[in-house]
Amino acid sequence: MHLDSFINGRRVASPASIEVMSPIDGHTVVGSVATTSAEQVRDALSAARTVGTFWSQLPAAVRARQLIDAIEDAAAIPDHSGQLIASEMGKPAQDADGEFQFARRLAAFCAANIEAICADQVIDDDEGTLLRIVEPMGVVAAITPWNAPVILAALKVIPALMTGNTMVLKPSPLAPLAVTAFYSAIAARLPDGVLNLVNGEGETGSALVESADVDLISFTGGPAAARAIGAAASRTIRPTVMELGGNDAAILLDDADWGPELAERVVFGAMLTSGQVCMAIKRVYVPRERHDEFVADLVAAARRVLRIGDPRLEGVTMGPVISAEARTRLEALRQRSVDAGGTVTELGSLDESVTPGGHWVRPAIVTGLSDADELVREEQFGPILPILAYDTVDEAIDRANGVEHGLASSVWSVDIPRAQAVARRLRAGFTFINCANRAGVSLRAPMGGRGVSGHGREFGDLGLSEYVQSHSINYPATARVGSAMAANRYPGA
């Protein structure tokens, strides 16, 4: 499989390309994408700018209908399946199939809310006539990561296009195949230039984010890249929306619903996609008197539900990590945790399909660490989970808040008002109750970060609102005929 860039309604070739190696065995070439040159990036931005006025002036319902139809058509193509995602980045195929269905459901949700978001507001009273209109930002540059490739692109493409923007989308070079194939098929069913797909490494990304033809940059990734993008955005005074990962704490209260089901929920909340999820559980705080019991339950639950193997096979629930570099980093992190005094307990069962050369990392929990240790202090982004004992709820809250990240968290208790009271004290953009990760996401619930976890929101009405700006048109009563003597008074006087 080789995929070209998709610019202004057509596929655009390039002499250079990026090969995508499967993490399953570390050497099979799954496919390749054309490397988009800086000149081609400029062409994509120009195409998006040219069609922008036409697209933005269509009624919101018309834009929504066109996008929904395009997504439905693209989702019906047999090649757009979880098997491709499994092959290029290691997520189990049955799980990855849901990414395409997510795009369809998100489009339906946004379509149901788009007219309210884009509607004019008129206030006509003794103070005058105020007309507040909502306008798209313009041309959006979107840069997306590899760990949920179709979903994380959908969270940018669908709200941005439905609100009247046009877009140039750049996927991660680590897993660009499913994104490029799926969204190029969508773009082909929209007016030329509304959605453009480019691929590449740093040069392509720099050409995109440094351009004065970009009106908004929407980025999901890590803090290092975010700082470079933020610096580029500052030079052109462009706004950004950034989701930058998390070090998400789960606080299990003493009245949690202890037992096998809770343990299974924690396992899935931490280990889905081999722990490579921004909103995955990254730290677990357990009452000291429950610590050993919970660890035993967690090990037993993982033995039941974690089957590590070839993600293309039915029944496998955990595949490899994304790259050899990620595997090496995680193995070194685990060893440093042992050196710091931690005890490692491996989880799950290895399937016979685990092949030499693949980027396999055996999931594990680590006990006996302190909050000062690296595995607790920093986001691991992999299947190694620290379990930490606490003595009081106040202590657990303070420790949960004691990291730089502030994306998601979770509180576990049968007393929901108590859980919500604890959640109010957590420094996070989103807190789950009695669940975590994908199990707690709602299309209506905005999610985003604080601190180094970023700014802006995705999902819900706020996720749509990130892609519009307000324009107030005011005709005050003092400006009406015969009101000249009052025209210069201060507002509210």
Image (cartoon, rainbow, N blue to C red):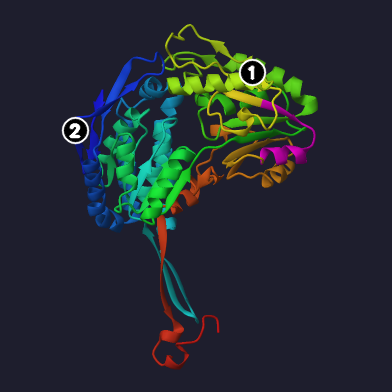
x then y, percent, for residue 219: 42, 43
User: In which quadrant is the C terminus drawn?
Assistant: bottom right
**Does 393 appear in magenta?**
yes
Left or right: where does residue 335 sit relative to residue 124? right
Q: Residue furthest top?
A: 352
Disc 1 marks a residue whose amino acid type is Ala
Q: CA distance from mark 2 to mark 1?
A: 49 Å
Which quadrant of the figure contains the N terminus? top left
Provide residue 100's location: percent of width, then percent of height: 39, 32
Q: Residue 14, position in %: x, y?
A: 20, 32
Amino acid type, callout 2? Ala
Local secondary structure at mark 1: helix
Task: Point out residue 42 in the picture as x, y percentages from the top left corner.
Answer: 24, 46
Q: Residue at x 39, y 57 (%)?
A: 237
Disc 1: CA contacts within 10 A as few (<14), some (14-19) or many (>=20): many
Q: Which residues are magenta?
A: 387-401
The residue singled out by tag 2 in the image is 13
Q: Would you call the spot at circle 2 few (<14 residues within 10 Å), some (14-19), or many (20 or more)?
A: some
The answer to whether residue 289 shows anywhere in this view is yes
Q: Which residue corresponds to mark 1?
A: 301
Answer with left or right where residue 298 lies relative to residue 232: right
Q: Is residue 178 above or below residue 42?
A: above
Task: Out of 219 and 470, give the one closest to the viewer.
Answer: 219
Select label 2 or label 1 by which is in front: 2
Vertical order, 257 against 220 (above or below): above
Residue 138 falls in which quadrant of the image?
Answer: bottom left
Q: Earlier in the sequence, mark 2 or mark 1?
A: 2
Please say if the residues under marks 2 and 1 sit with CB atoms less than 8 Å apart: no
- Disc 2 on helix, strand or loop? loop
Residue at point 69%, 34% (across, down): 251
